[in-house]
Structures are given as C-alpha cells and as structure tokens.
Amino acid sequence: MASGNKLYESFSPFPGLRPFTPEESDFFFGRERESEEIFLKLLRSRFVAVTGASGSGKSSLVQGGLIPRIKSLSEAGETQWRIVNVRPGSDPLGNLAS
C-alpha cells in the first residue's frame, strides 16, 4: 500500500474508549448545547455535578467541551475560574477537599 499523508497514518481525531481531553477540543463536537447548558448553570451556582451512566460521555463533555470554553474566557480576561478535576471514588467529599 502506497504511503499517503503520514499524519493520517499516525493520528486519529477519535480517542476511542478514553475521554476527550481539553487539548482535543477541536475534535469534540455535537454536544455544544449540553456544554452551554452546564456553563450557564455554573455561572448561576458555581457548582454543577455531571452525572450519568458509565461510558455515557460525561468526562468528554466536561473535558472536551466545558473546560476549553472556561479556559478561553479566562485567557480573554473575561472571568477567572479555578478548574478542579475530582474523581469521587469511595470518599467523594474527602477527595473534593484534598
């Protein structure tokens, strides 16, 4: 098989089973409405829990959609946010506090 563009041989915009990361936000699409809804809730309450079944896309929604939006506003000087990524585990409140 003749080699075409090397980029296509070593890069895929789809992360497979792992979640999208903020650095891959350019490839994350189709959940803009949900990202906006969570963002607007954060503006009102400062805390939003994103819950759902395992594998439903919670982490991708937050990391690929929401966090890049927040970071772009912070970099533009429009607002300051502290982003904390917490995995609840067996001690959710303890993990949040640490």
Image (cartoon, rainbow, N blue to C red):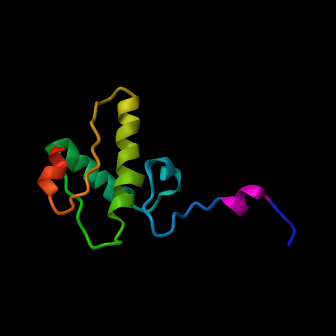
Q: Quadrant of the C terminus?
A: top left
In this orientation, does residue 33 appear?
A: no
Of residues 42 and 9, the one nearer the viewer is 9
Of residues 34 and 15, the one nearer the viewer is 15
Q: Position of residue 83 (x, y in %)?
A: 29, 41
Say whether residue 70 is left or right of residue 89.
right
Farthest residue, direction right: 2
Q: Position of residue 40 (x, y in %)?
A: 24, 47
Residue appearing at x 35%, y 32% in the figure: 74
Of residues 77 and 24, the one nearer the viewer is 24
Residue appearing at x 45%, y 58% in the figure: 20
Position of 55 relative to 23 (above/below): below
Q: Is residue 12 magenta?
A: no
Say whether residue 20 is left or right of residue 54.
right
In this orientation, does residue 57 appear?
A: yes
Residue appearing at x 44%, y 62% in the figure: 30
Range of residues picked out in magenta: 5-10
Of residues 66 and 97, the one nearer the viewer is 97
Q: Position of residue 91 (x, y in %)?
A: 14, 58
Residue appearing at x 53%, y 56% in the figure: 27
Position of 70 relative to 12 (above/below): above
Q: Quadrant of the N terminus?
A: bottom right
Q: Position of residue 5 (x, y in %)?
A: 78, 58
Say whether residue 38 is left or right of residue 97.
right
Question: Taken as a whole, is the magenta stretch helix, strand or loop?
Answer: helix
